Amino acid sequence: MNMTGHHAGHAAGGHHDAGTGTLHDALFILLFLVLIGLYTVAAKAAKRRFNRWPAMRTICWILGVTAAAGALTGPLAARAHDDFLYHMLGHLLLGMLSPLLLACSAPITLLLRSLTISSARRMSAWLKTRPVRLLSHPVTASLLNVGGLWVLYYTGLYSAMQHHPVLHVLVHAHMFVAGYIYAAALLCMDPSPHRTGYGFRAGILVLSLAGHGILAKVLYAYPPGGVPIAQAESGAQLMYYGGDAVDLILIFLFCLQWYKSARPGKRHKTASSPAIS
């Protein structure tokens, strides 16, 4: 009798979790579709007003939103709660690939083009405020991005987030925002309040890549609390090699920008503060 009640209760709980998960996914997918729709509308408006908006930027936005959707919905999000390998795959999508693609879509530039002149000026003034300048500096961005991962895995935060939904949301939000600020600070696809040159940003890039790679090796040798050794090893390998794959894209784009800025006729432009064109 008790066994039957236990199984019935477990099944009911499973149906409840499945229903909650389905609603969660539906809401997220709706949000992602809205984001894609808003960007597409703004891109068409910018194209009418300024005669051009690169189609590749729109493609990057769609792919970036899709990568985030893949990490936050569906089977990957469900498995990430119990399997470190899937958690790390989510990190690569949400914390690295999606932010990089979204940074390449130049959303701030598009927003400024979509606003009225007065609103655009207020937005530009806000971007120059001290808190924004501090957060968007390459040094701060790299510390938030890579340093945040060290804090996540070696302070007990990773284990705690598995049992506290609010903390789980906050960790993923930080992972995404820190990844975006990092990519935006290094590539400067949008106007930036900083005047850091390519050499300085290249140094930050090298140090942050080293920090990410070292963390992957440490995770392989010393798993975070509560993570089985086999999962830690698989997740660490994915972090190391998958992270390298995304970093190669970042390095290529960064070097391409540096090369273009050094071409004759381009030297007078400030690489770290591109014009809105």
Image: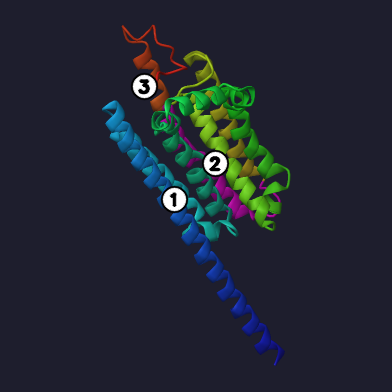
Instruction: Look at the numbered disc 3 and give the secondary structure of its residue.
Output: helix
Q: Which residue is mark 2?
A: 176
**Which disc is residue 86 wearing?**
none
**Mark sitting earlier along the chain (2/3):** 2
Say which of marks 1 and 3 sits in front.
1
Q: Quadrant of the C terminus?
A: top left
Q: Quadrant of the N terminus?
A: bottom right
Instruction: Look at the numbered disc 2 and give the secondary structure of its residue.
Output: helix
Q: Main secondary structure of the magenta part?
A: helix
Relative horizontal placement of residue 186, taking residue 106 as reference (left or right): right
Identify whether 21 is placed above or below 256: below
Q: Please name the amino acid that badge 3 sits on.
A: Leu
Q: Please name the amino acid that badge 1 sits on.
A: Phe
**Mark sitting earlier along the chain (1/2):** 1
Say which of marks 1 and 2 sits in front.
1
Image: magenta residue range: 223-251
The total of numbered circles placed on residues is 3
Mark-to-mark CA distance, 1 and 3: 30 Å
Residue 113 in percent (x, y) is at 39, 29
Characterize the local packing of mark 1: few (<14), some (14-19) or many (20 or more) Cα atoms within 10 angstroms. some
Identify whether 82 is placed above or below 69: below
Residue 114 in sight here: yes
Q: Please name the amino acid that badge 2 sits on.
A: Phe
Q: Which residue is mark 3?
A: 256
**Mark sitting earlier along the chain (1/3):** 1
User: Measuring 51% from the left and 35% from the top, which residue is drawn there?
Assistant: 180
User: Measuring 53% from the left and 19% from the top, which residue is drawn there?
Assistant: 193
Say which of marks 2 and 3 sits in front.
2
Q: Which residue is mark 1?
A: 32
